[in-house]
Amino acid sequence: MTDSPAAAQPVVEMEHVDKFFGDLHVLNDINLTVRAGEVVVVIGPSGSGKSTLCRTINRLEGINSGTIKVAGEVLPEEGRELARLRSRVGMVFQSFNLFAHKTVLENVTLGPVKVKKSGTEDAKKRGMELLERVGVANQAAKYPAQLSGGQQQRVAIARALAMDPMVMLFDEPTSALDPEMVNEVLDVMVGLAQRGMTMIVVTHEMGFARKAADRVVFMSDGQIVEEADPESFFTRPQSTRARDFLSKIL
Ligand code: ADP
Ligand code: MG
């Protein structure tokens, strides 16, 4: 959430990005710029390419043509530079993906110690601050399986934040949660947005989009079909595909 997104530096720039899985054109000429402090919500039917779009941004998936820059730099295909640049992009998935055999605090300190070469004590101090921020500091010594889904997802957010990312990607972060836990995770995300974090969020949570998004991007069949501020998008979708989709989820 930012006052003047147009003036801010681009953090993610996708230009004419194409990706195929065999014959399937899963990303079709994607052009998307996300500027510092912006919150972009990506919505669209299942199979439209939302997860793939997220995964290409930090090269969990390669692309067939086009360019993707993070903070002005193209991520290399592999190697040590990739790990360094990848740490600029924090990612939170639908399934929490915590390390099961590490404590909550270890989950949050591992990346900074290994990749960013932070000292152990510094990483612990910062880790506890982040766990505090997402409301699970009192769970620091437990193992992921001892936490609720909502708590685990908040740890996953803290773990991503511990790497000091320039942008956070969320891929349906609440869709695997029991309904009563959805809001505790969305509240943390709204808090991040209010603190100026640059975010790309795949979600069907319209309340979140209305509260936190600067822009909604609607995808269908691998294309960005429509882009608008949330109010315009939800009240006056322009394309037939967006209208059809909204009529099914609202
Ligand atoms: P969404 O997140 O919008 O549901 P995805 O990005 O997961 O969409 O998938 C887009 C399309 O690409 C789907 O048809 C899916 O089956 C296909 N797909 C995703 N990952 C792979 C893969 N690794 N190999 C082949 N096809 C894939
Ligand atoms: Mg998906």
Image: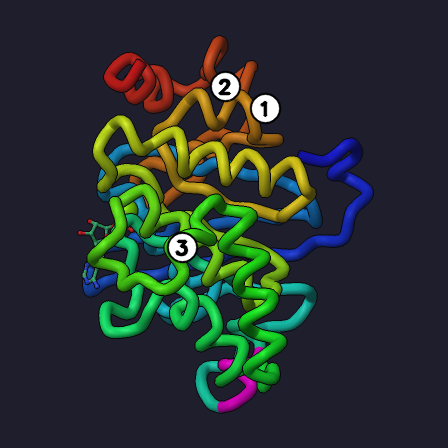
Question: Tag 3's secondary structure?
Answer: helix
At 45% from the left edge and 86% from the top edge, which residue is drawn?
78
Picture quarter containing residue 150?
top left
Quadrant position of the N terminus in the picture: top right
The residue at which mark 2 appears reads as 233
Asked whether the residues under the numbered discs 1 and 2 touch, taking CB atoms below 8 Å apart as contact, a structural biologist would say yes
Residue furthest to the top = 235
Q: Nearer the viewer, residue 87 or 223?
A: 87
96 to the left or right of 207: left
Disc 2 marks which amino acid? Phe
Q: Nearer the viewer, residue 22 or 197?
A: 197
- The prevailing secondary structure element of the residues shown in magenta is helix
At 20% from the left edge and 58% from the top edge, which residue is drawn?
145
Picture quarter containing residue 244?
top left
Asked whether the residues under the numbered discs 1 and 3 touch, taking CB atoms below 8 Å apart as contact, a structural biologist would say no
Marks 1 and 2 sit apart, C-alpha to C-alpha, by 6 Å
Q: Residues within 10 Å of mark 1 (few under 14, many from 20)?
A: some
Marks 2 and 3 sit apart, C-alpha to C-alpha, by 32 Å
Q: State yes or no: residue 66 in magenta.
A: no
Residues in magenta, as a range: 80-84
Q: Along the polypeptide, which appears first: circle 1 or circle 3?
A: 3
Question: Tag 2's secondary structure?
Answer: helix
| Circle number at residue 155 | 3
Disc 3 marks which amino acid? Val
Relative to residue 75, is residue 196 depicted above or below?
above
The residue at which mark 1 appears reads as 229
Q: Residues within 10 Å of mark 2 (few under 14, many from 20)?
A: many
